[in-house]
Image (spheres, rainbow, N blue to C red):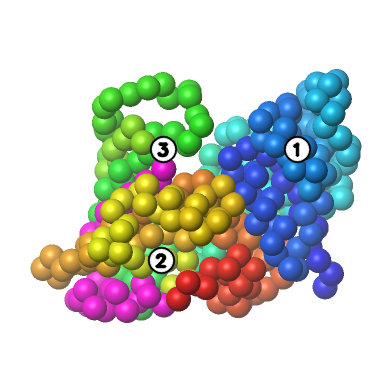
Amino acid sequence: MGKIKVGVAGYGVIGQRLADGVARQGDMELVGVADLAPTLSIRALKEQGMPYDLYLVDGADKSQFDACGIPVSGTFEELIDKVDIMLDSSPGGVGAKNKELYVKHNTKAIFQGGEKNSVADVFFHGYANYEKGVGQNYLKLTSCNTTGLIRSVDCLDRAYGIEKVAITIIRRVADPGDYHRGLTNALQMDKAPSHQAVDLMTIMPHIEATGILVHTPVTHGHIITVVATGKQKITKQMALDAFLTHDRIRVVTIDEGFKGNASFFRYARDLGNRRGDMYEIGLWADSIVESGDDIMYAINIPQESVTIPETMDGIRAACNMETDRLKAVAETNKYLGLGKWK
């Protein structure tokens, strides 16, 4: 099998990172990215020397790109026709409209968490239900919080068996650089249960889940606390042993300097990671505590980049690149450098 040809629709917060993620996969080829306007992200792409070819979606004004000296390689439909699979990170609702074009061109697609589940054949997570995505035409990724949450719950579930979880999400209100939420000095409650708990049960129907979400006026990462009930008692050491084996979970301590969400963002920048991204979730060893027969822990979710590995897994599944779950995630991890810190 030659390299799988991939396109990205929507070169925004997620789309930039999807493009970079595909470009790092040795068995995939990024054909190009598509967008509507010469946004700051597109202008930065031009200033970098156009490492990715740009295609324009319907409604784009090419003269705006010409005025900025941004080269255009073709139309959105031309991009779709050149690839095996599209990664759609368009604004919520736009992906469903784009699907009509994907169907027209007989091109597979993976949608991000902002779309409704009905847009896809399978609601997908690389670790938890990889097999269900194999050979499917349309997959939808879980949201950033759900992606990281499922990593940790699936890790414990496969090691020891989990019956139910109760979660609290301390949610960042907007991404860095966003202004649409305004300036706030308040915490905001969502109605329970949070969609992340409902989504977890969709992916892992054998687990009962519920949760509460609190919006916070910060931008760098979410924090989730999890109380899990195992089919057997899970001790702190048992939980820690399981988490340490997972290449997409970075186990840290407060004494090392990981005091909170901003610590992870700063550390990623100090590592020289592009845009300060981390693909792995952070898990505080200090947070793992036993509560009767339950186990409790806390994780950090780098919301801008955490879904990228699972999207790469989705390409491997949908395009039949690999049918074995563990082999698939291992390939993704290898190319993204996950687990190299161990």
Distance of label 1 from label 3 (alpha carbons): 26 Å
In the image, which disc is placed on residue 219? 3
**Labelled pair 1, 3 in contact (Cβ < 8 Å):** no
Residue 233 in view, yes or no: yes
Q: Residue 133 at x, y = what percent?
A: 61, 62
Find disc 1 in the rendering and name its residue: 47
Residue at x 82% of width, y 32% of height:
70
Residue at x 50% of width, y 29% of height:
178
Tell me the quadrant of the picture where the C terminus can be found: bottom left
Q: Amino acid at mark 2?
A: Arg
Mark 3, residues whose alpha carbon is within 10 Å: few (<14), some, or many (≥20)? some
| Residue 332 part of the magenta-drawn span | no
Instruction: Say which of 31 and 264 sits in front.
Output: 264
Which quarter of the figure has residue 214? Answer: top left
- SS class of the residue under badge 3? loop
Give the mark, 3 or 2, whose residue is nearer the N terminus: 3
Q: Which residues are magenta?
A: 220-245
In the image, which disc is placed on residue 250? 2
In the picture shown, does residue 333 fall above or below 139? below
